[in-house]
Amino acid sequence: MSELFSELLTLDPAVRRVWRIKLALTGSALLLAAIVYDVSNVFDADRTLPLGLASGLVIAGFGALAAWVPGVRYLSWGYRLTGQELLLQHGIVNRVRTVVPLRRVQHLDVTQDVVEREFGLAKLIVHTAGTRSSEVVLPGLPIATAEGLRDRIKGYITDDVV
Amino acid sequence: MTSSEAPDPDRTVADAAGSHRLHPVTLVLRFAVSAPAIVFLLIPVFRQGDSVAWFNVILAGVYAAVIVPWLVVNYLRFRYRVEPGQIVIESGVTTRTRRSIPVDRIQNVEIEQQLLQRLTGTARVRIYTAGSPQAEGSLEVVSLREAERIRMAVRAFQKAATGAAPAPASPEGFAEVHPARAADSAALDAPSAEPQPVLAAETLFSMDLRRTLLSGVFRFSLLYVGLAFSLLQYWEPDPEAMVMWLMRGPLEGVAEAAADSPWATAIAALLAATAVGWLSGILVNLNRFYRFDLTLDAGRLHRSHGLLSKSQATIPLRKVQALVVRTNPLMRHFGWFALEAQTMGIDAREQGHAAVVPFARFDELRAVAQRIRAGMPDPGESFAWPDVLEPVSRLTIRRAFLRYVLLIVLAAGAVAWQIDERGWWLLLLVLPAAWLAVARWRAMGWAVEQDHLVVRRGVFRRHTWVIPLARTQVVYVSGSLFQRRLGLRTLYVDTAGASPAYGSDVIDLEAETADRLAATVNLRAAQLSA
């Protein structure tokens, strides 16, 4: 298993910026709620939180997350396509190594969301008949790489009905 | 339809293309279902005949004028037919839907008879495919013979398609187990008639009344008590009147005793609830598993059971992904186990796990499991049940105990701080927690035996999975921050139809063992499927 997971390929470094933007988007949604709380309680003498603390916490928290998490997550990711299987490794807190035998692949998707499209990145989604592995996601690939992987894996799909 | 089909007296109106309608009893049943609404509308009229109430009569009239034709048109528009490669169901009045279900995608044709359907000699047919967890097609009411005919037709087409599959069961073979089927199967097997060896269906497991009742003893559930209490709410008894009745009536002594000693009353009520839960569990279990019968015939398991609502299901052996042995501490103490077959798209209500042996001694269960395994298409004849399983790392005891202690301290602290000082006594729970942590480690075990991965886990819900390596989907090795610090990993071999909630994870293996095991599983799975 360990030898299988040597010489893994890394994702496209630009994926860090995609993750950073997505964290910032989540953060700004929360920030909006915090600002609403702060503004609506400006003249409240006995408010629970001091003025600006809620907004400040959200900004500081998500700032730290956006600065730190994408880089570490990027380092934790690795993948490799061997002749028989797709290998994935990822996770900061919980590190998971996944072996997807290509003969088990049911179908494949390449998807792009708005942010990813901006950076020319895509996700490869591999569907199998397994319960936890009904969707195995490989993010942060240049669109050409993702489509190349898809076309290579496509050749292995057997007409295997569960 | 094939031209050689035998004339069928139960045939409902059929057009030239061979389309069928549902059994006419459908109309009666649907009227019966909608009738309470009319009665409900008419209640005020019966009570007082003023002008407001007469409005309801008009409403009921309009209702009847709309609903009745609607039901009739709906009934007339619903048609189905069994074609050589597919089952076609057409339905809908305003929106016409035409659904074709390819026969080779059909996993199971389920025939179910609930009480009303048994009284009218009809059955409900549900068609399951692998693609969807719900039934892909449902024919609500057809005659029992028609239901059997559909099932046999699907089977005949599937057999013709695979070609190599074993012989369609001869009429004699079926007559031994299912006398009612003999006539239909004779008619239906005629098209594919070449001389086939006579294969009798083999009974793998059946339960007599005594065994069924005994199994109910272990199915204690407070669920039914809860149901009974929620039904009681609809009575809305007047508490004051009840108390008066209690004081005056013959129960006066009991009521006084209850008032004198509230603790004894609470215990008595608890005992009563337990007794009710126990009894109702036995009855529900009896209703469900009455005359449980599992037979193996031409590579398919046939299962039939039920008292009030009878159900029959077919599980093709090649669709079985894994076998699961279940037990709990009480059942294990008396030496009882249950066996389930993990499948995909066979029965939605059992969530991919079909009970094949609901209650048996381990030896009986092992015999059935080996018989099933031997009948599966990939190699597995030589599967021997492992005597001992490999333990996982002892560090798992420490990890589990720390987790429990953390939870207990949090709970005790919360209770002591918010509710009552005495909450700190909850800290005594660390003693049973220590026992549980050790029991959890003892319960966990794994083995690779003759190209099978065997995984056991759970103290209160003990499951043992037997996963043929050839059925491996995806292999996971994961390690949380804490596990990695101790050099531990969790191994999980994913299979189709595995339970999303309670999986066959081997938790806290030593890292090298986990890696080696994952590599072995992956390699053997690839070799076996090649």
Image (tube, coloured by chain):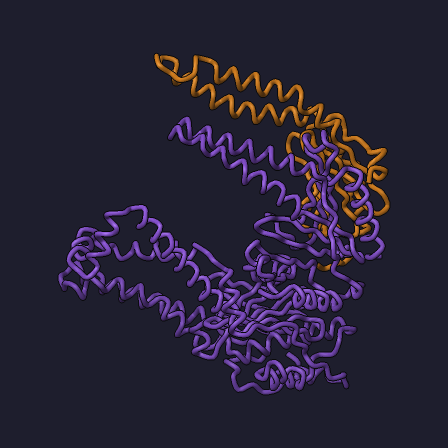
Chain colours: A orange, B purple
**Residue A143, quarter of picture:** top right
B153, above or below B367, in the image: below
The residue that appears at 76% across and 83% down in the rendered structure is B196
In which quadrant is the C terminus of chain B drawn? bottom right
Q: Is residue A124 in view? A: no
Q: Residue at x 66, y 27 (%)?
A: A19
Residue B281: quarter of image: bottom left
Looking at the rendering, in which quadrant would you find the N terminus of chain B? bottom right
Give the percent coordinates (x, y) of residue B506.
70, 45
- Relative height, residue A121 to residue B448 (above, below): above
Residue B16 position, x and y percent, is 58, 80
Which percent across, then down, holds residue A148?
80, 40
Could you say which is closer to the camera, residue B474 or residue B212?
B212
**As drawn, is B15 to the left or to the right of B171?**
left
User: Viewer-proximal residue, A52 or B27?
Assistant: A52
Q: Residue B61: horizontal and vertical position, in percent?
A: 27, 67
Q: Is residue B513 left or right of residue B500?
A: right
Q: Residue at x 61, y 74 (%)?
A: B151
Front-most of B388 and A119?
B388
Which residue is at a point 34% across and 53% down the rendered structure image?
Answer: B268
Q: Is residue B9 above or below residue A17?
A: below
Q: Quadrant of residue B492?
A: top right
Residue B295 in sight in this render: yes
Taking the image as shown, residue B191 lies to the left or right of residue A38, namely: right
